[in-house]
Image (cartoon, rainbow, N blue to C red):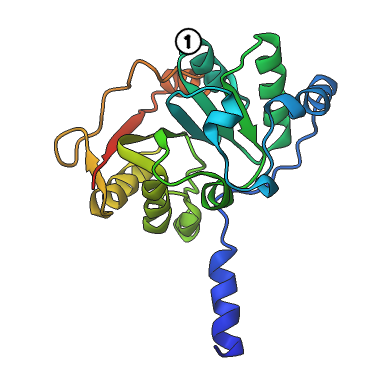
């Protein structure tokens, strides 16, 4: 491989769908991170995860990418104790707050990674193991020149497919219509995924997805919300 082609390959691999914000952790978030990580945290360097060992039981596993400040993920974990939840986010304040809430509610069905979701999927999540993958209100990267940073791309959906069991679900939600349309195009042209709705149609909001403060604010401003629910097929 030439130096030029190798450099080009490295550049492609380092395109990120997120930017690490410089927000400071509150004292309570920092304390929760220090005190609760050993209970709820999972490190990328631990490698491939055994879910039965991680949760000390067998149950359906729901993975959420980019849980923000953790409110909706905590609400789902509380309302569905028979399911196991894994959250992935790169922003430490949000991770700290989720750890704080998990400890306050004494939850035993939630674990968290503070790392790049693509790397976690590649190196830590067993193939065909996830019952549902959730991606709620990801960064829309609304400028056209930044669309390549949107996480829902063919390569990403091929990776998610590998990690999702047959008849498992990928559920995305966004309040950016242009991004919703792009997601629809990617999902309907990626092998292994089938729309749970008629071709090209968006889904009604499933009852299990909480309405976030962010979403309520958008609704007051007249913003629409689009849900996409696709099932994993052979």
Q: Indicate left or right for 106 with 174 as reference.
A: right
Q: Please tell me how many numbered marks the rendered image carries.
A: 1
Q: Is residue 114 left or right of residue 194?
A: right
Can residue 67 be seen from the camera position used here? no
What x and y, as percent, mark residue 27?
85, 22
Q: Position of residue 185 (x, y in %)?
A: 27, 50
Q: Residue at x 55, y 78 (%)?
A: 8
- Residue at x 66% of width, y 10% of height: 106
Q: Nearer the viewer, residue 214 or 64?
A: 64
Query: x and y percent of residue 231 in the render?
Result: 27, 37
In the foreground, 120 or 142? 120
Element at label 1:
helix
Q: Quadrant of residue 207?
A: top left
Neighbour tally class for label 1: few under 14, some 14-19, many 20 plus, Cα within 10 Å: few
**In the foreground, 192 or 171:** 192
Vertical arrangement, residue 126 with respect to residue 85, above or below: below
Residue occupied by mark 1: 79
Q: Is residue 212 above or below residue 163?
A: above
Quadrant in which the N terminus appears = bottom right
Q: Residue at x 76, y 28 (%)?
A: 38
Residue 39 position, x and y percent, is 72, 24
The image shows residue 202, relative to residue 22, as above or below, that is above
Instruction: Tell me the residue at 34%/46% (across/down).
Output: 183
């Amino acid at each position: 491989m030439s130096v030029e082609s190798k450099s080009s390959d490295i550049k492609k691999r380092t395109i990120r769908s997120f930017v690490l914000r410089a927000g400071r952790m509150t004292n309570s978030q920092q304390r929760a991170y220090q005190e609760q990580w050993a209970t709820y945290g999972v490190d990328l360097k631990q490698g491939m995860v055994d879910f039965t060992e991680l949760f000390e039981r067998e149950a359906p596993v729901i993975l959420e990418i980019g849980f923000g400040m953790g409110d909706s993920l905590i609400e789902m974990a509380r309302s569905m104790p028979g399911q196991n939840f894994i959250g992935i986010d790169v922003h430490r304040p949000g991770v700290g707050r989720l750890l704080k809430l998990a400890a306050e509610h004494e939850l035993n069905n939630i674990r968290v990674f503070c790392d790049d979701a693509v790397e976690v999927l590649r190196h830590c999540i067993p193939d065909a193991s996830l019952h549902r993958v959730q991606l709620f209100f990801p960064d829309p990267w609304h400028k056209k020149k930044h669309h390549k940073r949107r996480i829902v791309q063919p390569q990403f959906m091929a990776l998610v497919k590998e990690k999702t069991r047959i008849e498992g679900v990928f559920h995305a939600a966004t309040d950016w219509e242009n991004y919703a349309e792009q997601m629809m195009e990617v999902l309907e042209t990626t092998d292994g995924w089938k729309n749970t709705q008629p071709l090209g149609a968006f889904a009604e909001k499933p009852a299990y997805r909480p309405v976030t403060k962010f979403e309520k604010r958008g609704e007051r401003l007249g913003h629409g919300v689009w849900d996409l629910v696709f099932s994993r097929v052979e």
